Amino acid sequence: LDKSKKVCYNIIVKDKKNFKESKFIQAVYRGGSLAVGQTVEPQHLQVTVVYNDGTTQIAAEKELALTNATAKEKGTLAVTVTHTPSGVQTTVNVLVNALTIMGVD
């Protein structure tokens, strides 16, 4: 063993009894009506993270990733919401009730 080289070890100890992890998330759409071409943004959602110990926390917008968030047709848009720190996902349905938004002059 070359004593001139230092060896470092990174040891992580997890206390399984007190270990807290995300069990599931609940997402509620809080935005207005969507038209074709509009996109659901994280600020339009309230996402609650439920942990294995029964506690809950509202997720920050920066912790959310949205998939299939742009309305392509009239009907129901199923947006996949991912809580990025945990990787837990859910789907929230958003009504798309207008084909286009007309500007007012």
Image (cartoon, rainbow, N blue to C red):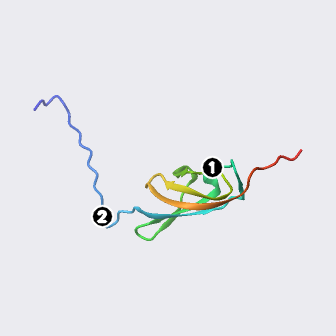
Type of amino acid under label 1: Thr
Identify the residue at horizontal 53%, vertical 60% (top origin).
91
- Please state the horizontal and vertical placement of residue 53, each as a whole percent of the image: 41, 69
The amino acid pointed to by label 2 is Lys
Pick the front one: 37 or 73: 73
Query: Residue 70 has which mark?
Result: 1
Instruction: Please tell me whether residue 102 is drawn above or below residue 88 in the rendered image.
Output: above
Quadrant in which the C terminus is drawn: top right
Q: Nearer the viewer, residue 74 or 3?
A: 74
Q: Quadrant of residue 14?
A: bottom left
**As rendered, which of 101 and 74 lies closer to the eye?**
74
Q: Residue at x 40, y 67 (%)?
A: 52
Q: Dot 1 surroundings within 10 Å: few (below 14), some, or many (20 or more)?
A: some
Proximity of marks 1 and 2: CB atoms separated by less than 8 Å: no
**The quadrant where residue 59 appears:** bottom right
Task: Specify the quadrant of the image occupied by residue 23.
Answer: bottom left
**The furthest residue to the bottom:** 54
Task: Name the residue beneath numbered marker 2.
Answer: 16
Task: Name the residue at 30% across, 62% down.
Answer: 15
Q: Which mark is residue 8?
A: none
